Image (spheres, grey):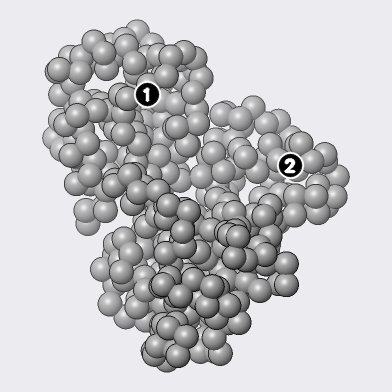
Amino acid sequence: MDRYLQNQVVTDLKSKMVFIGGPRQVGKTTLALKIAGNNKQYLNWDVPIHKDKILHYEIPAKGLIVFDELHKYRQWRNFLKGLYDERKAKCKILVTGSARLDFYRFGGDSLQGRYHYLRLYPLSYAELQMKSAADLGVLFKLGGFPEPFYKSSEVEAKRWSIEYRHRLIHDDVKSLEGIQNLSLLELLVARLPELVGNPLSLNAIREDLQVNHKTVTRWMDALERLYGLFRISPFGSPKIKAVKKEQKHYHYDWNLVKDPGARFENMVAVHLLKWVHFKRDTLGEEMELRYFRDVYKKEVDFVIVQNNKPVLLVECKLSDSDINDGLKYLKAKFPQTEAWQISLKGKKDYQSKEGIRVAPAMELLKELI
């Protein structure tokens, strides 16, 4: 199956380098090698013989060159800048990595203007061209990472999630962030899935782990840079008395979340983030994923904001239920904004008198990416 970014990568390589970021094992290397075809000029920093070639500048003279995990090389930005400036007429350069490559700026001059940055995210309902609620149920149980999804085993998916979390901490966090107290970090990572869907109190986590606020903040930032999780901020406007600081967090691997309601919300969060970032990365649209919560405890799970205006409101429910009061409130404040209440197991599909679409989740998810 062609991944959703394949055509965009091919197009962008005609003019600049392309960086593909995203969670580990989401399919970045597979995508890069598929684009490279038979001409697999592939160099992985984690492979000793490849690392030696990079350090001795034994780089192919022409064609498409794929660099994997190059951001672990401290001078990677200067290395790429020199290579691109020297060989851009003969070479195309594709760089993949399991980290926010736009944040890892160790060692030297900026690459500004020399690359396009694209983010590859887990498989989704639309990308898999799913057709039914049963299909969505499979995705809900197995997660969106290619390996556990295509194994089609819920037990294997659970085992994969545990191993994935271990590798994230002991490989990526340790090597890229220099964090030494991994035992406490493991406790944090194990605790976070229980807190999905609620505003995240770093102070409460600090008290649980008996560490200072600065340390917890550093750990959360590191996990976000390494695609271990993502956070969304509250949506505010002069029209509403919204909370302003408390963020919510979600995991790219929603299999980590045990509570069914929170897992469904997490799955939808990943779908929406994938769509928002696709629009930003490929079309340059100023879009963000937010949530709504006001001082009176009215809430809406997700608000898509474009150019500082809400364009989509989404509330998640496990099954058919009355329309959320927070969604009604926010729809009334922004009547031109599209609003959905979606459910994983519900059957109802209608438009309310407030203009809110109530429907099974697949009706919205199939319109994304």
The x, y position of residue 316, in whole percent, is 52, 75
> Label 2: which residue?
216
Does 75 appear above or below 217?
above
The residue tagged with tag 2: helix, strand or loop? helix
Label annotation for residue 112: 1
Label annotation for residue 278: none
Identify the amino acid type marked 2.
Val
Image quadrant assignment for residue 22: top left
Identify the amino acid type marked 1.
Gln
Q: Earlier in the sequence, mark 2 or mark 1?
A: 1
The x, y position of residue 340, in whole percent, is 44, 77
Q: Is residue 233 left or right of residue 90?
A: right
Q: Is residue 240 left or right of residue 363?
A: right
- The CA span between labels 2 and 1 is 31 Å
Q: Quadrant of the N terminus?
A: bottom left
- 110 or 186, which lies in front? 110
